[in-house]
Amino acid sequence: MKLSTYLKCVKKASLDNIQTSRGIQGEFVAALDSVFPKAYNPAAVEKGVYEFWEENGYFTAKNIKPRFSLVLPPPNVTGTLHLGHALTAAIQDALVRWHRMDGRDVLWVPGLDHAGIATQTVVERWLRQSKNVTRHDLGREQFLQEVLNWKNNKGGVIKQQLRRFGASLDWSREIFTMDSIHNEAVTEALVRLWNSGLVYRKESLVNWSCELSSTISDIEVDRMEVSGPTELTVPGYDRPVVFGELTDFAYRGCDSDIELVVSTTRPETMLGDVAVAVNPHDERYTHLHNTQLWHPFRRTSIPVICDSMVDMQFGTGAVKITPGHSHIDWEVAHRHNLPLVSVIDESGHIIARQQFDKFQGMKRFEARNAIRNELAALGFLRTVRPHSMQVPMCSRSGDVVEYLLKDQWFISCKKMAEKAAAAVREGRLQ
């Protein structure tokens, strides 16, 4: 039935006629069936509707008052959108549409996040699986081109998904976090913070992935619980590495026959030990306070120090202090003015230093076994026993995180925090 016939039916079919005349009612229903499909077809309907909205600039901000603006948290280009993105986009879309209905000029800014290491990781994985090459095989420029191709591909899919959501975004304002204007803004912000005395640089421990050759944030570190000896696959090793063991070994006194047995889950870092710590209230070691022990590999003396952070119930109650690879030990070293000695380099190998003897150049977990064997040969190894522990894992690469000393930028938040707290207390926030 043609649309004109349908309109005639609508005109003829008054409510009374529909209720009283089966013939007219039947003709009316038949007309509706011929004009409208029996089932809703979103692909056919919504595509045209969204295109109509865009073509007519319904989502473009007009720079008039009153205004309401919102930035879409830019999705990472690591992959396509999932249900969580749909949920949050729907909530934001409802909010901006309400403000439009309320007469405001609305700007909802879309964009994409380059996602840094996360994108690099997925691109490298894809290259290994699809082309059997690494970023080192390709070289810097070609690898960057592969990353750009990935961004363009995934970014295009993401933008199409947002359109299919019906998200009323102002696409004329689309951003990308690596655009030149945003890079300039980040640089400008850093310079202003520096000029204001709020940015400073100092050496500190960072989360390091040897597999990625990069630092990673705290939220990218997963803690794997192991209750005893557990084999884990570590990138760069042909065989699984055992974690969940506590190694006890002895340090001998410099000027006497005394010995002090320490407990550690990381014997490979003992090359960087700068002290042995005991709890000042632990009567077992009172006679060793302020004595000197001999480091068998670095061939130097290290002190016995007292620090309340030592758990008397952990292992033997005496712990080695390795500030170059432990956050707790780093704090202890600063309290006691101890030197910082790094043992492991960015590639996960023992640093090539003469003082590290035969272990220099070894992979960190291969050095673990080698050091145990050498301690046993020297008569210093006491026992290796099961122990529950947390293994810090890189969520991006599956690598075991190494803590390395590196220069880092910091922002001083104390003054700003005081101002913010005062504003809350004084009721100056609306």
Image (spheres, rainbow, N blue to C red):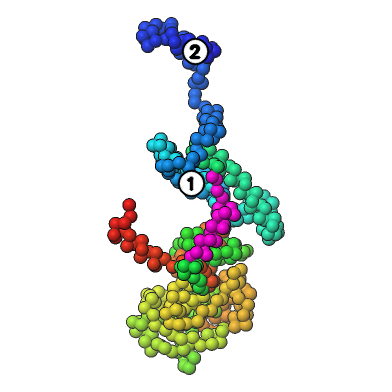
The image shows residue 169 at horizontal and vertical percentages of 50, 41
Indicate the quadrant where residue 421 lies.
Answer: bottom left
Horizontal side of 141 relative to 243 (left or right) equals: right
Residue ID at (54%, 31%): 52
Magenta-drawn stretch contains 178: yes
Residue ID at (49%, 91%): 254
Mark 1 residue element = loop
The image shows residue 327 at horizontal and vertical percentages of 46, 72
The image shows residue 377 at horizontal and vertical percentages of 57, 82
How far is disc 2 from disc 1 in space, using C-alphas? Answer: 44 Å
Q: Taking the image as drawn, is residue 134 in sight?
A: no
Magenta-drawn stretch contains 260: no
Quadrant location of the N terminus? top right
What amino acid type should be assigned to the residue bearing mark 1? Leu
Most distant residue in the front direction: 64
Position of residue 257 relative to residue 232, above or below, is: below
Q: Main secondary structure of the magenta part?
A: helix
Residue ID at (56%, 39%): 160
Residue ID at (70%, 59%): 139
Mark 2 residue element = helix
Depth check: 214 or 313 in front?
214
Give the crowd class for mark 2: few <14, some 14-19, many >=20 residues within 10 Å.
many
Mark 2 lies on residue: 6
Depth check: 361 or 3 in front?
3
The span picked out in magenta is 173-193
Q: Which mark is residue 72?
A: 1
Image label count: 2
Position of residue 82 relative to residue 400, above or below, is: above
